[in-house]
Amino acid sequence: MTNWILSFFGFEDRTFGAQRAKEWSTLRKEYVTQNPACAVCDKKGLLVGIQVHHRTPVHIDKTKELLWENLISLCRIHHLWIGHLGSYFSFNKDVEEDARVWKSKISHRP
C-alpha cells in the first residue's frame, strides 16, 4: 500500500506483518511444532493451515513479538474470525478466552 493510503486510514505506523525480527521465522516454526493444533477447533496439518497469532499485535507492542506467551495457534478460518474478529485491520484482545469458549461449544455441540 502506498503511504498516503495508510496515512488516510490512520495506519501509517502499522507494519501489517511486513517487518519482523530475524528470529521470528525460527520461533514460529518451533511454536507450531509444539502447538500444532488450532486452539479453537483442534484441527492440525498443512491443509488446515495452522497460523501463529500474536495475542497483543506487533504494531501495538513490538516488545511482545518474540514472547512465547503472546502466541496462540489458530487455523486460517479461526485466525480471521477469532483472532481478528473478521477483519485483519482489527484484533481480539480476548482471543485466548474466546478460543476456550468456542472450543467448548464445538466439542459439546448437539
Image (cartoon, rainbow, N blue to C red):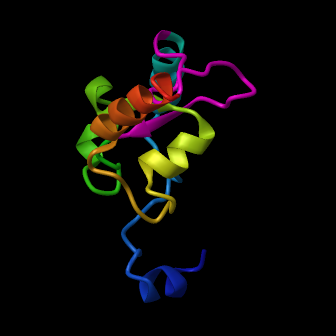
Spot occupied by residue 48 in the image (x, y as percentages of width and height)? 68, 29
Percent coordinates x, y for residue 8 in the rendering: 45, 89
Furthest residue in direction front, as rendered: 110
Q: Is residue 8 visible?
A: yes
Q: Main secondary structure of the magenta part?
A: loop
* 81 up-or-down from 10: above or below: above
Residue 69 locus on image (x, y percent) = 27, 26
Decide: is 37 above or below 23: above
In-image side of 68 versus 76 (left or right):
left
Q: Residue at x 51, y 59 (%)?
A: 86
Residue 19 in sight from this viewpoint: no
Can residue 80 be found in the magenta stretch?
no
> At 58% across and 34% down in the image, what residue appears?
75
**Which quadrant would residue 59 be assigned to in this image?**
bottom left
56 or 7, nearer to the observer: 56
Q: Quadrant of residue 99?
A: top left
The residue shown at (40%, 65%) is 14
Query: From what the image shows, is residue 15 above or below residue 83?
Result: below
Outermost residue, top side: 34
Does the magenta segment cover residue 44? Answer: yes
In front of the other: 63 or 49: 49
**Relative to 24, residue 29 above or below:** above
Question: Dividing the image into 4 quarters, which one contains the N terminus?
Answer: bottom right
Question: Which residue is nearer to you in this view: 104 or 59?
Answer: 104
Magenta span? 34-54
Disc tally is 0
Compared across the picture, whether 110 is left or right of 57 comes to right
| Residue at position x 53%, y 12% in the image | 33
